Image (cartoon, rainbow, N blue to C red):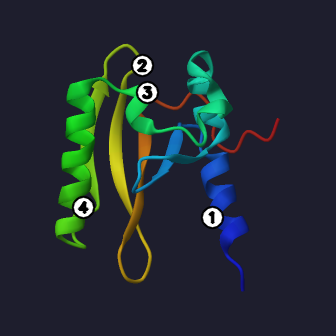
């Protein structure tokens, strides 16, 4: 069975920005929330570009350190990278692996705000 459509749907339905990169730091996918979040920097046009071009020198150094850490052990899979006080969110880098090795990483945003949607509100 091809699970790809299921995994893509999970990422696409996430209300938080998810930016997926290969090990060359090329942005290979942005979910709709990420496209919208990064619209003023090019949105969907960022796909195919280097994530490193979107960061300052210190951030680039940190990103490369995280990748090295991911490569050191299969146990090293997620690291907290930033808190955005204005948007009340945490940002993480998460390792992506196939059955054998590290293949990339993604940036995940998690908001700390309490949910405003009513439970089971089908309206």
User: Which residue appears at 21% of the width and 39% of the height?
Assistant: 62
Precedes in sequence: disc 2 or disc 3: 2
Secondary structure at badge 3 equals loop
Residue 65 as seen in the image, left or right of residue 44: left
Confirm whether residue 29 shows in the render. yes
* Marks 3 and 4, how far apart at CA: 29 Å
> Closer to the camera: disc 2 or disc 3?
2
Judge by depth and name the residue closer to the eye, 119 or 100: 100
User: Which residue appears at 33% of the width and 33% of the height?
Assistant: 90
* Marks 2 and 3, how far apart at CA: 9 Å
Precedes in sequence: disc 3 or disc 4: 4
Judge by depth and name the residue closer to the eye, 118 or 106: 106
* Residue 70 - label: 4
Residue 51, percent from left and from top: 44, 37
The residue carrying mark 1 is 7
User: Which residue appears at 26% of the width and 54% of the height?
Assistant: 67
Q: Is residue 25 above or below residue 10?
A: above
Secondary structure at badge 1 equals helix
* Marks 4 and 2, how far apart at CA: 27 Å
Precedes in sequence: disc 4 or disc 2: 4
Judge by depth and name the residue closer to the eye, 92 or 19: 19
* Residue 87 - label: 2
The residue carrying mark 3 is 113
Secondary structure at badge 4 equals helix
> Closer to the camera: disc 1 or disc 2?
1
Secondary structure at badge 2 equals loop
The C terminus sits in image quarter: top right
Residue 21, percent from left and from top: 47, 50
Q: Is residue 34 above or below residue 28?
A: above
Precedes in sequence: disc 1 or disc 2: 1
Confirm whether residue 112 shows in the render. no
Residue 80, percent from left and from top: 25, 42
């Amino acid at each position: 069975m091809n699970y790809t459509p299921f995994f893509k749907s999970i990422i696409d339905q996430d209300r938080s920005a998810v930016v997926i990169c290969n090990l060359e730091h090329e942005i290979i996918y942005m979910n709709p929330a990420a496209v919208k979040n990064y619209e003023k920097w090019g949105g969907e046009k960022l796909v195919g570009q280097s994530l490193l071009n979107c960061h300052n020198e210190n951030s680039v150094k940190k990103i490369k350190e995280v990748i090295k850490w991911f490569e050191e052990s299969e146990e090293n899979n997620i690291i907290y990278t930033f808190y955005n006080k204005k948007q009340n969110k945490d940002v993480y880098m998460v390792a992506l692996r196939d059955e054998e090795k590290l293949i990339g990483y993604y940036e995940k945003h998690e908001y700390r705000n309490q949910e405003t949607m009513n439970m089971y509100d089908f309206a």
